[in-house]
């Protein structure tokens, strides 16, 4: 069975018709592909109760009441998985700490303060602020290149630091 839309005004029996047809299909063939009833998020529990409350179904294994969000989650799982959850601020600081330890020899300006309390938080905050203004390593390199001839700047990071850590 494909997708069907049942359209009508309030009180015209749309919900009851959906529940009746879902119950009939689940009773006729308890095993098979899922029978999905798509409802708004706030209505999922109420519709599940109505489906089970009729007493005609003993359980709802094949019949599934899904919200749009839950359906999207299922589709993304089937289509190759969900994206990784975003890294927390603490996780970003841990990555930054590991990178600073690994690239310690490349640090020109910050090598003496890289292990001081608060340094990682300040660097992470600076990266966060630069990202909020859509500034990346390449834009910083261009700015630095324009400042060098004037004697205004010198690089704090070595050449191996080419991308943001996150």
Image (spheres, rainbow, N blue to C red):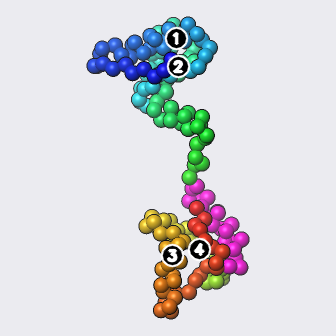
Q: Nearer the viewer, residue 12 or 76?
A: 76
Give the CA distance from mark 2 to mark 4. 55 Å
Classify 10 Å Cα crowding around label 4: few (below 14), some (14-19), many (20 and above).
some
On residue 119, the disc is 4
Q: Is residue 39 left or right of residue 91?
A: left
Classify 10 Å Cα crowding around label 1: few (below 14), some (14-19), many (20 and above).
some
- Looking at the picture, how far across and down is residue 110, in whole percent? 62, 81
In the rendered view, tell whether residue 14 sits above or below residue 110: above
Give the CA distance from mark 1 to mark 4. 63 Å
Which residues, given as a range, are shown in magenta? 87-106
Residue 95 belongs to magenta span = yes
Residue 154 belongs to magenta span = no
Looking at the image, is mark 2 or mark 4 earlier in the sequence? 2
Give the CA distance from mark 4 to mark 3. 20 Å
On residue 25, the disc is 1
Classify 10 Å Cα crowding around label 3: few (below 14), some (14-19), many (20 and above).
few
Looking at the image, is mark 4 or mark 3 earlier in the sequence? 4
Snapshot quadrant of residue 74:
top right
Q: Secondary structure at mark 3?
A: helix
What residue do we see at 42% from left, 26% from top?
Answer: 39
Residue located beneath label 2 in the image: 35
Looking at the image, is mark 2 or mark 1 earlier in the sequence? 1
Answer whether labels 2 and 1 touch (C-beta < 8 Å). yes
Q: Secondary structure at mark 2?
A: strand
Give the CA distance from mark 3 to mark 1. 62 Å
In the rendered view, tell whether residue 114 sits above or below residue 166: below
Looking at the image, is mark 3 or mark 1 earlier in the sequence? 1
């Amino acid at each position: 069975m494909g997708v069907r839309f049942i359209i009508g005004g309030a009180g015209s029996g749309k919900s009851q018709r959906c529940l009746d047809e879902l119950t009939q299909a689940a009773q006729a063939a308890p095993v098979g592909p899922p029978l999905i009833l798509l409802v708004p998020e706030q209505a999922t529990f109420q519709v599940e109760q109505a489906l089970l409350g009729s007493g005609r179904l003993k359980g709802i294994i094949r019949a599934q009441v899904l919200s749009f969000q839950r359906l999207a989650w299922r589709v993304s799982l089937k289509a190759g998985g969900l994206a990784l959850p975003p890294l927390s601020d603490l996780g970003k600081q841990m990555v930054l700490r590991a990178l600073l330890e690994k690239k310690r020899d490349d640090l020109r300006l910050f090598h003496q303060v890289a292990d001081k309390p608060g340094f990682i938080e300040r660097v992470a905050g600076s990266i966060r602020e630069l990202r909020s203004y859509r500034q990346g390593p390449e834009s910083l390199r261009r700015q630095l290149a324009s400042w060098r001839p004037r004697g205004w700047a010198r690089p704090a990071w070595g050449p191996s630091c080419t991308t943001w850590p996150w």
